[in-house]
Amino acid sequence: MKITVVGYWGAYPEKGEATSCYLIEHKGMKVVIDCGSGAVSQLQQYTELKDIDAVVFTHYHADHTADLGVLQYSRIVDKGLERTSDHLIMYGHQEDPDGFATLSKEGAAQGLPYNDKESLHLGEMTFSFCRTDHPVPCFAVRVEAEGRSFVFTADTTYIDALESFSRDTDLLIAETSFYEGQEAKNFGHMNSTEAGRLAERSGAVKLVLTHLPHFGRHDDLVTEAKKEFGGPAELAASGNIYEL
Ligand SMILES: [Zn+2]
Ligand SMILES: [Zn+2]
């Protein structure tokens, strides 16, 4: 599996960058997780939009869905110009019916539901989901292929359920919206210490901090996470690639 960080900001994208978006590639299959603000522009550095098979949305907050509409438009254009005949398949949870309805677009995209009771098979990858604790329904994603795995926490406070969900994963991509000592929980998020603790307790091999804040020094987030986590940890950055 090849994972590319397309966008890693929380809330809004800094100049020339994007909020939550990750490109997952395996044996010719291209799946995008989240399609935040700026994502469609950034995605084109790594793939042609017509080659994207599916998008999986963790929840319907704007920093994870802002470019959903323009991605659908790109597929209308690409189909109209006969660059592809395939619909985009858009996976989302159904606990927000209005959010789920936005996934489908006549002639371009088909919304399909996922839930935390059963796995989703996309190509030879298996996606499973874990409900997080966030102001709106949101699901963390675990992707497995050929015995390797990664987990993306999506947006969440620290919850024990994520420890077992992330058990022994090769790569934990954990949201880190605040610094050590800050009450991230009050905002439905995790801080750097909690991201490190989750990596340590789940037995993750490597930790990547993402959904980064627009204040402070990001390098401090890594230092703080490493107080809890004994393995390698680093910041997400646009274009970072992880091969599993
Ligand atoms: Zn977010
Ligand atoms: Zn959110």
Image (cartoon, rainbow, N blue to C red):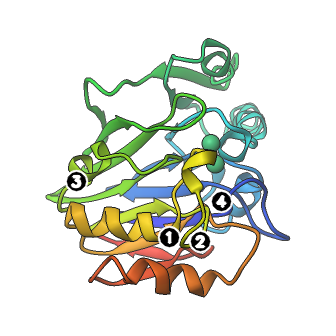
**Which dot marks residue 179?**
2
Mark 1 lies on residue? 192
Residue 169 visible somewhere in the drawing: no
Label 2, ligand 1: CB separation under 8 Å: no
Q: Residue furthest right?
A: 15
Q: Residue at x 69, y 33 (%)?
A: 79
Q: Residue furthest left?
A: 147
Q: In the figure, is residue 231 to the left or right of 168?
A: right
Real-space Cα separation, disc 2 to disc 1, in angstroms? 5 Å
Q: Are marks 2 and 1 in contact (CB under 8 Å)?
A: yes
Q: In the figure, is residue 56 to the left or right of 28?
A: right
Label 4 Cα crowd, 10 Å radius (few <14 / some 14-19 / many 20+): many
Instruction: Tell me which label, 1 or 4, sits earlier in the chain.
Output: 4
Real-space Cα separation, disc 2 to disc 4, in angstroms? 29 Å
Instruction: Tell me which label, 3 or 1, sits earlier in the chain.
Output: 3
Specify the amino acid type for callout 1. Ser
For numbered disc 3, what is the local secondary structure? strand
Where 55 falls versus 101 (above or below)? Answer: below
**Front residue of 140 and 197:** 197
For numbered disc 2, what is the local secondary structure? loop
For numbered disc 1, what is the local secondary structure? helix
For numbered disc 4, what is the local secondary structure? helix
Instruction: Tell me which label, 4 or 3, sits earlier in the chain.
Output: 4
**Front residue of 48 and 21:** 21
Specify the amino acid type for callout 3. Ala
Where 30 falls versus 108 (above or below)? Answer: below
In front: mark 1 or mark 4?
1
Mark 3 lies on residue? 145
